[in-house]
Amino acid sequence: MTVRALVIEDDAVCRRGLVAALERLGLSVYQAGSVEEGRPLLEEGMAMLFLDLGLPGMSGDRFVSHLARHQPEIPVVIVTADDRLERAVELMRRGAFDYLAKPVTDMQLEAVVHRAHNEWERRREVKVLREERDRRHGLKAVVGSSPPMRKVFEQIRQASRSTINVVLLGESGTGKEMLARALHHESPRRDGPFVTLNCAAAPTDLLEPLLFGHRQGAFPGAVENQRGRVLMADAGTLFLDEIGEMPPELQAKLLRTLQDRTILPMGAEEEIPVDVRIVAATNRDIEQQLADGRFRQDLFYRLVAFPIAVPALRERPGDVPELAYHFLHKHRGEAGRSEIARIAEDALELLQHHPWPGNVRQLENAIYHALLTARPGTRIACADLPEAVRHPERGAAGMQRQAEASQPTSSGGRKLSILHDPTTGQLLPLRQIEELAFAMALEESGGNTTRAAKTLGVARATLYRRLKNKKSA
């Protein structure tokens, strides 16, 4: 690959000499007599810039600061007659890569070209990795263009400019953790750790050591020192999911951490300073918990400095097609259905009008379900979607509720369950009972086949096989 370099020097003789020396080193060299003339050339993809200081118009030292902010991937080598050491130090502090005093020898030039090229490749790799990280974890990773989501994105951008604590309010499955990650990656803390803790998933007696850490011997089973999530998130962001489930006594300790910016691990004698941003999330009615005394007001007001309400999927139906295609392309390879690239129009319409009680998570599971059960072809049809989506009023849970409400009895007065045929009072055949159990487990798991298989105590492959057999029947 040809390495491009730009020389900005107003002295024509010096410029020609430097250009010739760089060309002898194998570089493709562009040249300009001023910053204004050279700026458009930088868009050609330069690997390095050789810059004089005493230029007409914008001076070289001002341009160094500008490039450090707007094009930091380009190493800038200062070439000037000013050989003062303090001047060189100042310019490198502003963002210059290196500093050469005129006249420049071929040996000096060859060495600095080699180092600048390596630095350019390193910076370019960092830039690509950062862009990929932002694409996967920043706001670009969150699918949605509806007005409610545009409002959320704007609030995320506003909050990211500071270190203010944020609370995300919304139903389960709306993508609160993804938004918390986006907030972290849009913030100045993006290079720090992003650590999560689900307060509802951890046993109550383990929540404190998980959060604050512990010392060896602090409690039975504490065989070694362990860092807690707060310390793991030092200089970064700690995401506390389902914070409404945190016990009141632990809420008091978290409040102290927020106030004093220190933690005291279990069994420790000295506090440890921490610098952590808290992003909390809950699907509970926090105001009701405040009224019931289950959540501390002082902690609530510390956390709710910047609340963001995350809309349910039914409140943004315009995002459903975009989300559906996002999940289609995300999972079709994993599901072994790479040939499927489209969703039929009537299927998309059905998806848009579904209430989605499980929100985005349920939609993702529904698309994965459809990929597994779809007939041969290149698109997902209505018939491929889960029963709960195609006929929500006839879903397995609805059938169960209807059966329980009617409470039929056999001729002998015995109460019938959903496992009985309501017309004969006889137990249903085992195969029908199994099909009903599979359907109920899938609906209750929001279409998540892994969770449904676990609930039923069967292998996931067994569930897949039964779904496919049902489709081919």
Image: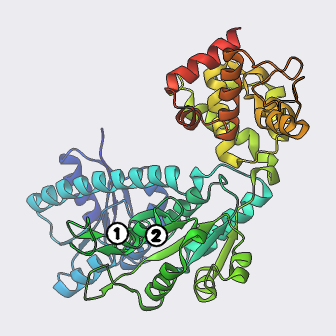
Among all residues in the image, which is located at the extreme top? 473
Crowd rating for badge 1 (residues with CA inside 10 Å; few <14, some 14–19, many 20+): many
Give the percent coordinates (x, y) of residue 139. Answer: 59, 57
Task: Tell me if residue 280 comes above or below residue 46 in the rendering.
Answer: below
Q: Which residue is mark 1?
A: 232
Task: Tell me if residue 339 comes above or below residue 261 in the rendering.
Answer: above
Q: In this orientation, which residue lies closer to the viewer: 237 or 42?
A: 237
Give the percent coordinates (x, y) of residue 302. Answer: 58, 85
Distance in Å between CA atoms under marks 1 and 2? 8 Å
The secondary element bearing badge 1 is classed as helix
- Circle nearer the N terminus (1, 2): 1
Q: In this orientation, which residue lies closer to the viewer: 161 or 105?
A: 161
Residue 238 badge: 2
What residue is drawn where x is 36% and y is 71%?
209
Whether residue 340 sits left or right of residue 33 in the image: it is right
Q: Are marks 1 and 2 in contact (CB under 8 Å)?
A: yes
Q: In this orientation, which residue lies closer to the viewer: 131 or 347?
A: 347
Whether residue 259 sits left or right of residue 82 in the image: it is right
Task: Tell me if residue 44 comes above or below residue 156 in the rendering.
Answer: above
Among all residues in the image, which is located at the extreme front? 412
Crowd rating for badge 2 (residues with CA inside 10 Å; few <14, some 14–19, many 20+): many
Given the image, on which type of amino acid does mark 1 rest?
Answer: Met
